[in-house]
Every structure is written in structure tokens, then in C-alpha cells.
Amino acid sequence: MMKALYFLVPIVAGFAFSGCDRTPPLDQKIAADSYLAFEMWRSRTEPDLTLDQRKDFAAAQWEISSKIIADRKPADSQDTAETMREQIDGKTIREVLERGYGLKLARLNAECTALESFIRHNAERQPVDVESANYLADWRDQQMSRLTTEDEQAESTQQKLDLLLGHPHIPHPPLPPLPESPKPP
């Protein structure tokens, strides 16, 4: 009888633990009600994430913190970190990534709109000499380079968000043609 029991215990234990599936990493809830709780949660959870997921999670925290600073100008970085932790506590990693991607898209889209406006405004300026025309042309080149970079980042972020949400990704249209710099007199 005792030998049969030794034989059955591993089998029963195997069946008991086979039904215990781990929560997928992105669906794990974040424990961030204090600095210590958040650091302990991160030390347990980050090994389950890929390098890209860890980078995206850190970027999402940065976007959330930046939004907190922009919205209310907290007293110091500790206050910002505490507010960020309050906002992500109890959320899943997936929810935090979704919010981070959304905030980043809003920021990038606003920056792209502002850059397009600056480029159009500068194209209307009339240079008084060759030097000012060259300055405007160089300035336009810098703004176009930044606009292209930000547009590519927005496209990449939208693609990540679509993948996270399980939506098909539809690339956004290319940048509209923008006016050239004014010619010297």
C-alpha cells in the first residue's frame, strides 16, 4: 500500500500543477502602491518580459511621467514618480503599454503639426539677402529632418499599438508636400 502511495503522489501533484497556468506577462497586474512594492514587483516580473517589452514599459512610464509634469507641474521628481506609480498600480502591463503608446502618439502628432506649421510659416518669409535665405533653407532642412523622424516614430508607435490591441495595422499616408524655402532676392 505504501509503495502505491509513493507512486500516486507525483502523478496527483502533476495533475494539480498542470492546471495552474501562469498569467501571460502582459496581463500581469502591477503592484505599485509604494516604491518598495513597485521595485519588488519589477524584480519578479521583468525577467518574464522580452527586452523590447521592458524597453517599451520603461518608455510608457516616461510618457506617463511626462504627461503628469505637463499637466500639473509637480513639486519634484519624487512627487512625479509617486503619481505615476499611483496611476499604474493595479493595471496590467498591457494597459500601461497601451496608455504609453497613446500618449506618445498624441505628443508626436502635436509635434508634427507644429513643425508643419513652422515650415509653412517660414516659407512665407521674404529673405532680405542671400545670407538670410541660406539661414531659412538650413532651418527648413533641420525642421524637415525632425518632421520625418517624428513621423517615422509615430508610424512605429501606431504599429506597436495595433499589434498590442490585435488590430490590423494600416500605414498612415505619407507627409504632405511642404513648401520650399524662399529664394534670395
Image: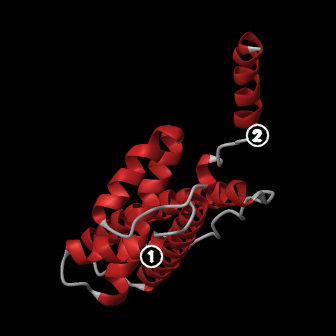
Return the residue nearer the eye: 31 or 171.
31
User: At which x and y percent is residue 181?
Assistant: 45, 71
For numbered disc 1, what is the local secondary structure? helix
Crowding near the residue tagged with mark 2, few <14, some 14–19, many ≥20 C-alpha atoms within 10 Å: few
Q: Is residue 169 left or right of residue 25?
A: right
Going from the N terminus, do you reach mark 2 or mark 1 first? 2
Return the residue nearer the eye: 146 or 28.
28
Where residue 152 sits, quadrant-wise, is: bottom right
Residue 158 image label = none
Q: Is residue 26 left or right of residue 108?
A: right
Q: Which residue is mark 2?
A: 19
Residue 87 image label = 1
Q: Amino acid at mark 1?
A: Gln
| Residue 108 appears in the picture as rendered | yes
Residue lying furthest right in this view? 168
Q: Amino acid at mark 2?
A: Gly
Dots 2, 1 in contact, CB < 8 A: no
From the image, state whether disc 2 or disc 1 is nearer to you.
2
Return the residue nearer the eye: 163 or 137.
163
Measuring 77% from the left and 31% from the top, which residue is drawn there?
15
Q: Is residue 148 left or right of residue 82?
A: right
Residue lying furthest bottom in this view? 72
Spatial separation of the CA atoms under disc 2 and disc 1: 33 Å
Return the residue nearer the eye: 145 or 168.
168
User: At which x and y percent is residue 185?
Assistant: 37, 77
Which quadrant is the N terminus positioned in?
A: top right
Crowding near the residue tagged with mark 1, few <14, some 14–19, many ≥20 C-alpha atoms within 10 Å: some
